[in-house]
Amino acid sequence: MTDTTRQALQQQLIGLHVNGEDHEVLTEPRRTLVDVLRHDLRLTGTHVGCEHGICGACTVLLDGSPVRACLMFAAQAEGSEIRTVESLAPGRELSDLQQAFSEHHGLQCGFCTPGFLMLAEGFLAERPEASKEEIREVVASNLCRCTGYQSIVEAIDDCATSRRAALRHRIEGTGEDEEAPCSSATRSR
Amino acid sequence: MKPAAFTYHRARDVEGAARLLAELGDEAKIIAGGQSLVAMMNFRLARPAHLVDIGGLTGLDGLRTDQDGALHVGALTTHHAMETAPPEVLGTEFAVIRDAMRWIGHLPIRTRGTVGGSLAHADSTAEWCLLALLLDAVLVARGPRGERRIEAADFFLGYYTTALEPDELLTEVVFPRPAPRAALAEFAERRGDFAVVSAAVDLELAPSGGELSGGRVALGGVAPSPVRVPEAEEVLNGGMPGPELFARCAAVAAESVNPPSDANGSARYRRSLIRTLVARACEEAMAR
């Protein structure tokens, strides 16, 4: 019993890099990443649902990859770049992904939304050319009890399509000066 | 829920981790990706007094093929790293491993969960455990007494129980020979859930072509650990590959095991799944 008491009082200093800022947190080792984000750093955009990796409400990006913030201790995240939903849009304007969720009604109650946004953000960064089928497969990672998922899939697919179009536009925009004959030939076909 | 209190230790190297485990005794647990352990700790099904974090150790991740064609997978390699490995590192000879990854949890689980962690956790339906048994993998463990190589057939001892000593940790798993005609099939209520039953086969075509010169059949979810089914393998040996042979092999597999009845399904239901999944795995293996 004394052993447990002693351990409960034990604190450790953890350095975390979240949304581009460095933080130092004095906390118990048993604190999960999602609890440190919410309680110690007051980044309450990340939600916590099931606490055993099923619902995905706590999904954040760890070095760019979507992870469950309830399935890791904050201490394990030292030295990694963490991104939460707060990083998507720095100002009051929505990011393209958030805008797509809004336009397609990819949320109702909104509890699961931060998790879905970070899941999609991480997934599209790795698979910008993802098909709708792949998107369907990936959103099965998280639980949404309102939308029935269709609108979430549409939102992510729409965002991916716009990002691809923008990228193509940028590439073709610069390509036109350098390789004009080639790109005009492509266009005439 | 929140996990019980523990002391956190970060290992600097494998030797240090083994030494810590030896010092702390069975009150300590290794944590790598933590995708099974943290969930169990949050439920307080596990309450280790000490966690030894090996997640940051270098040299324990990645995969390579040696000159004998054996595939070496570092214990800290994530499932996602396996499924996205470039074809020149993980080719058609081990396509069964790459394809099996999509059955493991979901993307955000696979980005953290590790090969070594899955094998050491030893869930009877885990894809890595089934693959290790099917393909005669050798599990490399390091402890204070040095390195030890354990055959997969001797590694899984029962529910969440392995041949690892409390002061040993897995560093690598070696798949000794290519398995170009192998496949894994499974069924779960929802995609990403633990399988109710999983089946994996590795077929060997006779050099002359035509008939099979051998085959292996392994099942998960039918016993406390994954099992090989010699009776079903006997059916494959010398048979002409095709739906008739595969159906017979699957039927024999279903009759040769004694699956449990629990909340996930009755024994009868599991036998029915075995008949479907073994045949499906055979078909997929032949189609490679």
Image (tube, coloured by chain):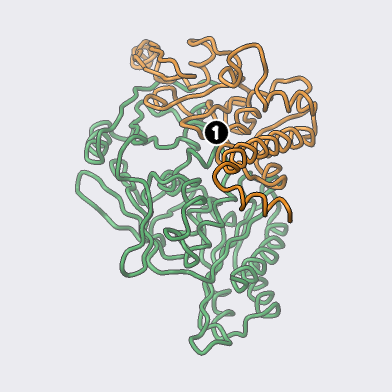
Q: Percent x, y for residue B102?
A: 59, 50
User: Which chain letter goes with mark 1?
Assistant: A
In this view of the protein, which residue sits in the foreground, B281 or B44?
A: B281
Q: Colour of chain B?
A: green
Residue at image coords 27%, 31%: B24
Q: Report the number of numbered marks.
A: 1
Q: At which x and y percent is residue B130?
A: 51, 58
Q: Quadrant of residue A140?
A: top right
Q: Secondary structure at mark 1?
A: strand
Q: Residue at x 52, y 42 (%)?
A: B110
Chain in orange in the render: A
Quarter placement of the N terminus of chain B = top right
The residue under label 1 is A66
Along the line of sight, which residue is nearer the eye, B111 or B13?
B111
- Percent from the top left, x then y, of residue A187? 71, 50
Q: The C terminus of chain B is located in which quarter?
A: bottom right
Residue farthest bottom in this picture: B208
Q: Residue at x 54, y 44 (%)?
A: A178
- Amino acid type assigned to the residue bearing label 1 in the image: Pro
Q: Considering only vertical position in the picture, is B212 above or below A73?
A: below
- Vertical relation: A154 (above or below) A3: below
